[in-house]
Amino acid sequence: MPHPLRSVAVFCGSRFGADPAHAAAARALGQGLATAGIRLVYGGGGVGLMGEVAGAALAEGGQVHGIIPDFLLRAERPPPSGMALEVVPSMHARKTRMFELSDGFIALSGGLGTLDELVEILTWRQLGLHDKPVVVLDIGGWAQPFLAMVEAMIGQGFVAESGRRLFQVAADVPACLELLRQAPPPDSAVPSARL
């Protein structure tokens, strides 16, 4: 039976992080997406966790589509070959294209850029611009401060209780892939509005 999602965007860091578990999870995620026949859409870089997830997907024979702003070509050094690489003019264009090409989203470990991508995609979902699944992959407790912040905003009345349903949390890669497997097919998603 084919996977319900054809293409998934992964938001993740251009650094490795202090704990080797993050890089191991990135490699496992790339392999898992490729094995499931899901195209990886990501930020286009060949450094840090971005490079790990893309390299693992490519090594497993998976399809990879990288999207990178032109000003980051030197800093984030895209992998030399084997994937589709799209160069865009800005960070906003990168996020918009990742959204357009993806049936779902995974936030893997990362820094401020990863957090920016995650919060924007959740905001778009909250506004009804899409109903694509979003999974936060909490490797080594990376997502705990973010989850606490969401709870604090709910507690202080800035986010509705329903805000908890905008995303799901997975403690490891197998749990993340299982959540994606259970997601509804993309044609049952709410049509996206103009972003």
Image: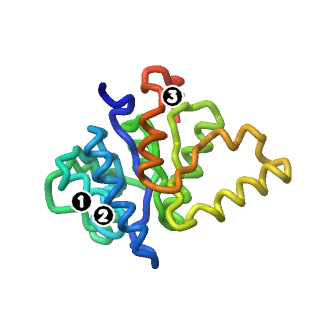
**Image location (x, y in percent) of residue 82:** 15, 52
For residue 70, say whether it is visible: no
Q: Residues within 10 Å of mark 2 (few under 14, many from 20)?
A: many
- For label 2, the SS is helix
Q: Earlier in the sequence, mark 1 or mark 3?
A: 1
Q: Quadrant of residue 5?
A: top left
Distance CA(mark 3)–CA(mark 2)? 30 Å
Model colouring = rainbow
Q: Earlier in the sequence, mark 3 or mark 2?
A: 2
Residue type indicated by callout 1: Gly
In this view, the residue in front, 108 or 111, is 108
Q: Is residue 59 left or right of residue 99?
A: left
Q: Residue at x 53, y 59 (%)?
A: 138
Q: Are marks 2 and 1 in contact (CB under 8 Å)?
A: yes
Q: Residue at x 43, y 25 (%)?
A: 185
- For label 3, the SS is loop
**Image location (x, y in percent) of residue 121:** 54, 44
Q: Is residue 56 left or right of residue 17?
A: left
Q: Residue at x 31, y 60 (%)?
A: 27
Distance CA(mark 1)–CA(mark 3)? 30 Å
Q: Which residue is mark 3?
A: 192
Mark nearer the viewer, 3 or 2 = 2
Farthest residue to the right: give it: 156
Q: Is residue 44 left or right of residue 174?
A: left
Q: Residues within 10 Å of mark 3 (few under 14, many from 20)?
A: some
In this view, the residue in front, 140 or 49, is 140
Mark nearer the viewer, 1 or 3 = 1
Q: Which residue is mark 1?
A: 55
Distance CA(mark 2)–CA(mark 1)? 5 Å
Q: Residue at x 49, y 59 (%)?
A: 114
Q: Residues within 10 Å of mark 1 (few under 14, many from 20)?
A: many
Q: Which residue is mark 2?
A: 52
